[in-house]
Image (cartoon, rainbow, N blue to C red):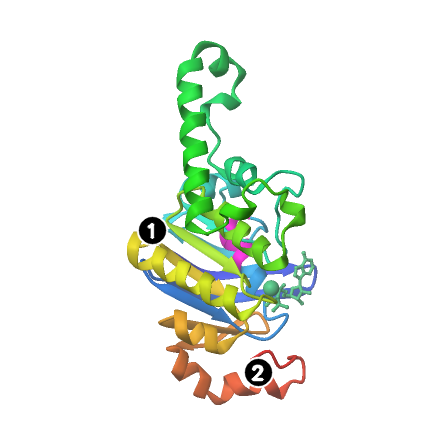
Amino acid sequence: MISLDHVSVSFGGLKAVNNVSFDIPSGRITGLIGPNGAGKTTLFNAIAGHVPVTSGRVLLEGADITKLKPHERAALGLARTFQIPHEFSRLSVLENFMAAAAAPLGENVLNVVFRRSRFLAEEEAVTRAARQTVRFLELDRVSDEKAGNLSGGQKKLLELGRALMRAPKIVLLDEICAGINRTLLAKIADKIKELNTGRQLTFCLIEHDLDYVSKLCDNVVVMAQGEVLTRGSAAEVRRDERVIEAYFGGGKYEGRA
Ligand SMILES: Nc1ncnc2c1ncn2[C@@H]1O[C@H](COP(=O)(O)OP(=O)(O)OP(=O)(O)O)[C@@H](O)[C@H]1O
Ligand SMILES: [Mg+2]
């Protein structure tokens, strides 16, 4: 689905991502792990177009998307969530989902005037899709609640739902499970599995909880200091001395593994 070809991202003198190459295979759930500051979020930003790459290429289904803007990549089926949720706090859950849908025809004033019936039909379709997303994520009880009033865990579900509203082919999840309770954690895992098996949706997820990664991911990439340290099955990488060293050796890691 995604191929990273020698991707580097620098901030001034800092190489946050350094010469990273790997594939995110279609139809699978790939885990991206590594200690704090390893460059995981920066790599997601590079894939989604939120930071420019210094060198290298990002391919989506074989097409070079390195120079595309974030919304152009989204239109091709690439969705991502943010480590810090980006909800519209004064809109309801349902309205947040509607706002996240692919830009409807009605955005253009002339379309509203001349193609009103089509605009209304699209708005209806967006509303229907938003309601389905509410139901799928079991957010019915808070559907009309302002997003700003949701719990931390509910905001993570909202973040996932907003990504789903774009009818993506691949979703990049950045620590969607950080700081939420066990029940919600299990629920989000179920939803991800359901989307993966039922709709063949491809995922790449950044997570610090290795048990969680082991349960969901058949394929794990480990980053440290901007580079790919190793990759393999969850069991393989957990046994890898270099991974243990990266997590526990440098004293940078705060013990979430
Ligand atoms: N916009 C930015 N400007 C300057 N430096 C940045 C920027 N974004 C990230 N960095 C730096 O790049 C490095 C990688 O950060 P990044 O957020 O990608 O790590 P991460 O693996 O996602 O860490 P965490 O597990 O803590 O979320 C860090 O040293 C960070 O301080
Ligand atoms: Mg991060």
Residue that mark 1 sits on: 62
Q: Which mark is residue 246?
A: 2
Q: Main secondary structure of the magenta part?
A: helix
- Using the numbered discs, state the Cα–Cα distance from disc 2 to disc 1 in whole angstroms: 32 Å
Instruction: Please name whichever residue, 192 or 257, is drawn nearer the observer in this view of the structure.
Output: 192
Which secondary structure, mark 1? loop
Residue 218 horizontal/vertical position (percent): 35, 71
Tell me, yes or no, if residue 1 can be seen here: no
Is residue 8 part of the magenta span, yes or no?
Answer: no
Seen in the image, is 193 located left or right of residue 106?
Answer: left
Sequence order check: which comes first, mark 2 or mark 1? 1
Q: Residue at x 54, y 43 (%)?
A: 143
Q: Report the magenta residues as a range.
A: 44-49
Seen in the image, is 233 located left or right of residue 248?
Answer: left
Q: Residues within 10 Å of mark 1 (few under 14, many from 20)?
A: few
Q: Where's ligand 2: which quadrant?
A: bottom right
Seen in the image, is 211 located left or right of residue 225?
Answer: left
Q: Quadrant of the C terminus?
A: bottom right
Which amino acid type is shown beneath numbered disc 1?
Gly
Q: Residues within 10 Å of mark 2 (few under 14, many from 20)?
A: many
Residue 92 horizontal/vertical position (percent): 60, 39
Residue 126, compared with residue 49, is above or below; it is above
Residue 21, compared with residue 66, is above or below; it is below
Residue, far right:
12
Q: Residue at x 43, y 81 (%)?
A: 237
Which amino acid type is shown beneath numbered disc 2?
Ala
Which secondary structure, mark 2? helix
Residue 102, compared with residue 44, is above or below; it is above
Q: Residue at x 47, y 56 (%)?
A: 172
